[in-house]
Image (cartoon, rainbow, N blue to C red):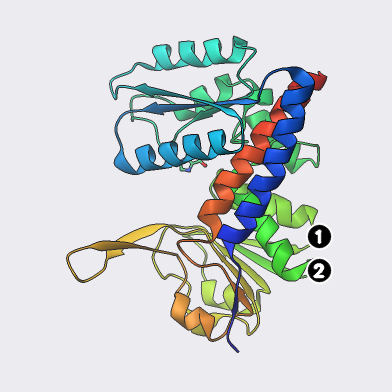
C-alpha cells in the first residue's frame, strides 16, 4: 500500500478562502474588519518566523493585523497590562500571545488574563473546559486543523481506534477531546507510556505530537492507518544545513499507512488557517453579544 497524502496546503487554502468570504460579509455588516493582535516577547527566531506568517495570512483574508514586539526583559506586569488594554480594545477580536514566553513570565497567568472571548488560541481554562464538556468553544488551532484533515481522509470516525501521542494542553489534550466528541475510541500515549508499539499497532488514527523526530516507525503502523504528523523537528540534513522533519518516519509510513500528512505542508498551514477561522468566529460572537 502507498499512503495517500493529505495535502494540508490545499485544504488550508480552501479554509482561508472560506474565511475571506466570511470576513467580507462581517466587514460589510459591521463597518469594520475583524482584528487579530499577536504579542511576541523576546527574539526567538522560530517564533519571529511564525508571527510574521500569521500577520501576512491575517491581512490576506481581509482582517486587521497588529503585532506587538516586546523586548525579552519585558516584565510580567507589563505584559499583563498590555493584555488588559487589548481586552478593553473594541477593535481587537483575537489576542494571541506567542509561546514560549521568557522564563521569568508565568505563561499560565498570562493566558488566564486574556478575555476568553478573544482567546483565539483556545488556551484559556474557560475554553479548555468548554471543549472538555462539549460546549461551544474557541478550540486550539493545531488540533482543529488535524481534525479537519482526519475528516477529509476518513469522513466519519465513529468507533475507530485513535491514538494521540503527546499530552500537551496545546495539542494532545484538545486533540483527544475532539476525537472523543467525534465518537472515536481514544488513547493518549506520552513519554511514560510502556508499550507505545502495541498502541500504535492497534490504531486506525495516529496523531503524533511529541517533538521527537521519527519516533513513530512506519513498520509499527496498522496497515491503512490515517497518520497525522504534528512534529516540527529541525534535524541535521547532512550537508551542513538543517531540515524540518516530523515525529513520524515518513518513508516507512508511506509504505504502510492509508493516509499521511507531510512535514512541512501538512499540519502547519492548517494551524494558521484555523487561527483565522477562530478570529472570525470570535468577531462574530462578540458582535452578537
Ligand atoms: N507557539 C507554538 N505554537 C503556538 C500556538 O499555537 N500558539 C501560541 N500562542 N504560541 C505557539
Q: Is residue 131 above or below residue 279?
A: below
Ligand 1 under 8 Å from disc 2 Cβ = no
Q: Residues within 10 Å of mark 1 (few under 14, many from 20)?
A: some
- The residue beneath circle 1 is 183
State the residue at coordinates (60%, 40%). Answer: 275
Say which quadrant the C terminus sits in. Answer: top right
**In the rendered view of the protein, which quadrant contains the N terminus?**
bottom right
SS under mark 1: loop
| Residue labelled with disc 2 | 159
In this rendering, is residue 53 above or below 224? above
| Quarter assignment of residue 149 | bottom right
Please state the horizontal and vertical placement of residue 79, each as a whole percent of the image.
Answer: 43, 17
Q: Nearer the viewer, residue 153 or 110?
A: 153
x, y percent for residue 114: 58, 21
Residue at 63% across, 36% down: 122
Label 1 and label 2: CA atoms lie apart by 6 Å
As rendered, which of 161 and 249 lies closer to the eye?
249
The residue depicted at 50 percent of the width and 67 percent of the height is 262
Answer above or below: position of 183 versus 223. above
CB-based contact (under 8 Å), mark 1 and mark 2 = yes
Q: Quadrant of residue 137?
A: top right
Label located before the other in sequence (1 or 2): 2
Horizontal and vertical percent position of residue 7: 59, 65
Amino acid at each position: 500500500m502507498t499512503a495517500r497524502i493529505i495535502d494540508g496546503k490545499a485544504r488550508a487554502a480552501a479554509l482561508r478562502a472560506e474565511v475571506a468570504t466570511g470576513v467580507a460579509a462581517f466587514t460589510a455588516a459591521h463597518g469594520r474588519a475583524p482584528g487579530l493582535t499577536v504579542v511576541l516577547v523576546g527574539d526567538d527566531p522560530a517564533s519571529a518566523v511564525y508571527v510574521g506568517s500569521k500577520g501576512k495570512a491575517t491581512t490576506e483574508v481581509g482582517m486587521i493585523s497588529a503585532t506587538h514586539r516586546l523586548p525579552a526583559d519585558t516584565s510580567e506586569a507589563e505584559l499583563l497590562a498590555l493584555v488588559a488594554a487589548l481586552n478593553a480594545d473594541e477593535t481587537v477580536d483575537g489576542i494571541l500571545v506567542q509561546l514560549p514566553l521568557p522564563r521569568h513570565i508565568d505563561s499560565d497567568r498570562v493566558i488566564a488574563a486574556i478575555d476568553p472571548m478573544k482567546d483565539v488560541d483556545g488556551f484559556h481554562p474557560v475554553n479548555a473546559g468548554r471543549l472538555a464538556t462539549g460546549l461551544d468553544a474557541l478550540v486550539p488551532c493545531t488540533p482543529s486543523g488535524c481534525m479537519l484533515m482526519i475528516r477529509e481522509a476518513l469522513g466519519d470516525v465513529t468507533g475507530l481506534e485513535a491514538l494521540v501521542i503527546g499530552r500537551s494542553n496545546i495539542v494532545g489534550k484538545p486533540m483527544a477531546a475532539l476525537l472523543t466528541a467525534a465518537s472515536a475510541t481514544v488513547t493518549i500515549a506520552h513519554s511514560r507510556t510502556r508499550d507505545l508499539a502495541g498502541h500504535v499497532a492497534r490504531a486506525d488514527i495516529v496523531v503524533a505530537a511529541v517533538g521527537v523526530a521519527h519516533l513513530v516507525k512506519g513498520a509499527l503502523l496498522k496497515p491503512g492507518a490515517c497518520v497525522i504528523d504534528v512534529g516540527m523537528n529541525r534535524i541535521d540534513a547532512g550537508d551542513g544545513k538543517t531540515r524540518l522533519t516530523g515525529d513520524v518516519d515518513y518513508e516507512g509510513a508511506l509504505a504502510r499507512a492509508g493516509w499521511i500528512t507531510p512535514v512541512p505542508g501538512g499540519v502547519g498551514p492548517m494551524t494558521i488557517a484555523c487561527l483565522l477561522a477562530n478570529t472570525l468566529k470570535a468577531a462574530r460572537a462578540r458582535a452578537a453579544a
